[in-house]
Amino acid sequence: MAAKIIDGKAVAAKVKEEVKAACTKLKEERGLIPKLVVIQVGDMGPSTIYVRNKKKACEQVGIESEIWHLPDTITQDELLDKIEKCNQDDSIHGVLVQLPLPAHLDETACTNAISPDKDVDGFHPVNVGRMLAGQETFIPCTPAGIMRLLDEYEVPLDGASCVVIGRSNIVGKPMAVQLLERNATVTVCHSHTRDLPSVTSQADILVSAVGKAHFVTPEFVKPGAVVIDVAMNRDENGKLCGDVEFEKVSEIASAITPVPGGVGPMTVAQLMSNCLLAARRSFQL
Ligand code: NAP
């Protein structure tokens, strides 16, 4: 049985259309345009590509965007000053600092410096706390995008057994909380988990956010499971791939996200949604 392919590109296009329609309405009816500032320091890894994708998505949906590309010689205090400038500027509704930062800069201090009201990544501890408490907040974009994918494909969550591999603050932990919020029974695995395949093969929904190519083999997967591959790795030939052995796992899963074209496009689309939310709140709408 070949698994259904969960088409993240198509769902992301739908999310962006929704945001675009809302932005058009906001502009026509009230003359308001949401604005995002992305702060990039130096050129760490693929940051420039990610930042470019965010700018492009903003253009598609009608969100104004500015990229503040700062030199990697910037000091911590200078960077915090830039963030504070965004916090104080009422014309800016969403702010994010593209991670990772060069080693001499403190990522936690930067995340904590962003006003929780403009924290469209949902990484500020106040927003993390709100999420844990089940209150309305900015949900980190990758897990929020995965939840939307699961809903679009009508994957039953209530009572489902879900396993998340990975416990990072940006993917694994918020993913687990979101699934729990929807009444799934959630297990979080990590590098200290014993006999990982025996745990993951119990899952109705398996989310992998490890960052290792070919990591999830068929023995990790229960027949008929839904498999969500968050990772973005390069294989031996430099080709973009996820954690999951896609061809082999497709033969036993009921549905699966490809890489590319699965979770990745949803993350950017969800960021647009969070920017719209930040703007609406600042306009008290
Ligand atoms: P991360 O912070 O490096 O976390 C990786 C997690 O995997 C950690 O919790 C680690 O466990 C766990 N792990 C590592 N080796 C393991 C093993 N042998 N067995 C079980 N667990 C293991 O990474 P991240 O930021 O969450 O990102 C994960 C992947 O998703 C990366 O490929 C990243 O590029 C990708 N990503 C994609 C998107 C997207 O939009 N598609 C967004 C964000 C991230 P410990 O905690 O014990 O170390």
Image (spheres, grey):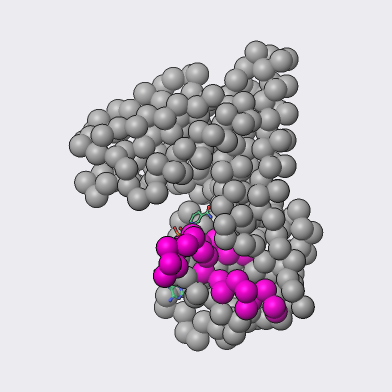
- Where does the magenta region start and end? 228-252
Residue 76 location, quadrant: top left
Looking at this view, is 135 or 190 the one in front?
190
Q: Is residue 74 left or right of residue 163?
A: left
Quarter that holds the N terminus: bottom right
Looking at this view, is 175 or 182 the one in front?
175
Q: Residue at x 20, y 37 (%)?
A: 73
Q: Position of residue 174 (x, y in %)?
A: 54, 56
Please say whether residue 243 is one of the residues in the magenta stretch: yes
Count the marks: how many?
0
Q: Position of residue 145 (x, y in %)?
A: 62, 50
Q: Position of residue 172 (x, y in %)?
A: 51, 62
Looking at this view, is 261 or 143 the one in front?
261
Please say whether residue 163 is one of the residues in the magenta stretch: no
| Vertical position of residue 51 compared to residue 224: above or below | above
User: Taking the image as drawn, is residue 138 in sight?
Assistant: no
Q: Residue at x 47, y 84 (%)?
A: 194
Residue 74 location, quadrant: top left
Q: Residue at x 46, y 44 (%)?
A: 50
Q: Position of residue 86 (x, y in %)?
A: 41, 25
| Vertical position of residue 269 compared to residue 133: above or below | above
Quadrant of picture, ligand 1: bottom left
| Vertical position of residue 145 compared to residue 53: above or below | below
Q: Residue at x 67, y 74 (%)?
A: 250
Looking at this view, is 183 or 169 the one in front?
169
Q: Is residue 213 left or right of residue 203?
A: left
User: Taking the image as drawn, is residue 69 in sight?
Assistant: yes
| Vertical position of residue 178 compared to residue 196: above or below | above
Quarter that holds the C terminus: top right
